[in-house]
């Protein structure tokens, strides 16, 4: 009980921060990709935030020609799945139907049709070390024949009135992971549902909550607390851990958001003087939305006449707002990055 109040207070403070932003989607949109990276790393993928942004900047979607590129695609699918879920939320409540359609996007192109994107599994599965047999499993979810009934109960609880919404969310997350309704993607989808729940219950105004940062940093305790629910019936330990995760993550998200807003305001005043152009703000907004990019994309998408766009990029590079990630060579265009924004978002590649 002592953890419930602080969790609500921390999320309320973060909510106030989000409401103060003139355009949260533009300013902190890159944090969604960082959340996707960290959520996928919990499942064992290796790409960093910087690698994902570089891959995306090259404009080659659905390239799974190597294991690393397949992992990057898995990360990008996570971000796309969140956006798809929010689009579906315009006409659907948070429900099994929405979750299935979101899972279809999450698993798009990964592992072929045998993963049955958007459909509950029809076979048993288990959780354990890579290549572990059923006998070596750390946890065995419910049988495939029980999934429809289990998820119906899960959805009923989702829409029920409970004494506290954050405790309800803790229980929903643990139960979803225990049911493990899909062949793959359950962990990532379960963490994505945390954000969707906070929006669906009007706790936050938009899907800008990134709990995987805390869960990745405390991965062993996270998995052990989930296991202890089924093994030891330790709901109190799990709920305490989850409330602490919400409290710490709300504070971290709020701090990052405020830093990004300060950076935007500083650069907003600076860029007009640096570029002497009426298109300065248009360039700044585009770069905040695309902090790693190849120059042809900027020319094509920014809405700035190409001669002016070339001059603006030259000036921003000269004054060190942008750095060169990859030099242009032959037909290969230069790739540029906005290091200040990436550092706040959590990039450690040294852009």
Image: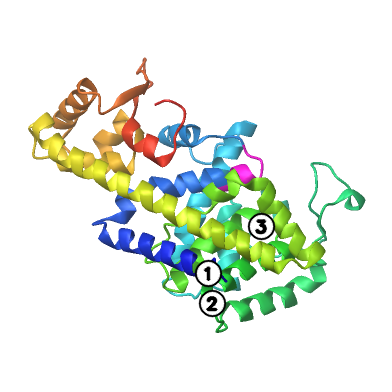
Does residue 19 show up magenta in the picture?
no
C-alpha distance separating marks 2 and 1: 8 Å
Say which of 45 and 163 sits in front.
163
Residue 109: percent from left, percent from top: 60, 47
The residue carrying mark 3 is 186
Left or right of 42 on screen, residue 56: left
Residue under numbered circle 1 = 4
Image quarter (top left, top right, bottom left or bottom right) of the C terminus: top left
In primary-sequence order, the first of circles 3 and 1 is 1
Q: Which residues are magenta?
A: 39-45
Image position, residue 258 (x, y; %): 31, 49
Is 59 drawn above or below residue 257 in the view shown? above
Q: Is residue 224 left or right of residue 196?
A: right
Q: Nearer the viewer, residue 275 or 311?
A: 275
The earlier-in-sequence mark between 2 and 1 is 1
- Asked if the residues shown at circle 3 and circle 2 are in contact, with their CB atoms under 8 angstroms apart, the answer is no
Mark seen at residue 128: none
Secondary element at tag 1:
helix
Q: Which sits in the foreground, 33 or 59?
A: 33
On the image, which quarter does residue 239 sit in?
A: bottom right
State which quarter of the image contains the N terminus.
bottom right
Which labelled disc corresponds to residue 164? 2
Residue 122 can be seen in this image: no
The residue under the point 42% across, 66% down is 9
């Amino acid at each position: 009980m002592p953890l419930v109040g602080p969790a609500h207070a921390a999320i309320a403070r973060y909510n106030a921060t989000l409401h103060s932003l003139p355009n949260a989607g533009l300013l902190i949109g890159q944090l969604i990709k960082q959340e996707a990276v960290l959520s996928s790393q919990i499942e064992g993928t290796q790409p960093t935030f910087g690698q994902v942004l570089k891959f995306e900047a090259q404009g080659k979607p659905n390239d799974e020609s190597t294991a690393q590129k397949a992992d990057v695609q898995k990360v990008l699918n996570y971000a796309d799945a969140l956006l798809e879920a929010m689009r579906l939320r315009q006409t659907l409540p948070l429900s099994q139907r929405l979750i299935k359609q979101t899972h279809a996007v999450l698993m798009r192109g990964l592992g072929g049709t045998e993963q049955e994107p958007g459909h509950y599994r029809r076979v048993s599965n288990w959780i354990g070390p890579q290549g572990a047999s059923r006998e070596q499993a750390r946890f065995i979810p419910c049988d495939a024949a029980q999934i429809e009934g289990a998820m119906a109960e899960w959805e009923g609880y989702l829409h029920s009135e409970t004494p506290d919404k954050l405790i309800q969310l803790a229980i929903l997350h643990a139960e979803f992971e225990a049911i493990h309704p899909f062949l793959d993607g359950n962990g990532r989808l379960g963490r994505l549902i945390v954000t969707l729940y906070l929006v669906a219950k009007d706790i936050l105004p938009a899907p800008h909550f990134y709990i995987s940062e805390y869960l990745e940093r405390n991965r062993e305790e996270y998995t052990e607390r989930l296991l202890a629910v089924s093994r030891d019936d330790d709901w109190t330990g799990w709920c305490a851990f989850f409330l602490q995760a919400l409290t710490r993550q709300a504070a971290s998200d709020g701090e990052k958001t405020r830093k990004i807003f300060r950076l935007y305001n500083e650069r907003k005043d600076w860029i007009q003087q640096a570029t002497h152009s009426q298109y300065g703000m248009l360039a700044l907004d585009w770069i905040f939305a695309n902090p790693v990019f190849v120059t042809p994309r900027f020319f094509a998408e920014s809405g700035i006449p190409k001669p002016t766009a070339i001059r603006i990029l030259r000036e921003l590079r000269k004054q060190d707002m942008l750095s060169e990630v990859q030099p242009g060579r032959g037909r290969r265009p230069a790739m540029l990055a906005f290091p200040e924004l990436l550092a706040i978002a959590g990039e450690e590649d040294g852009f």
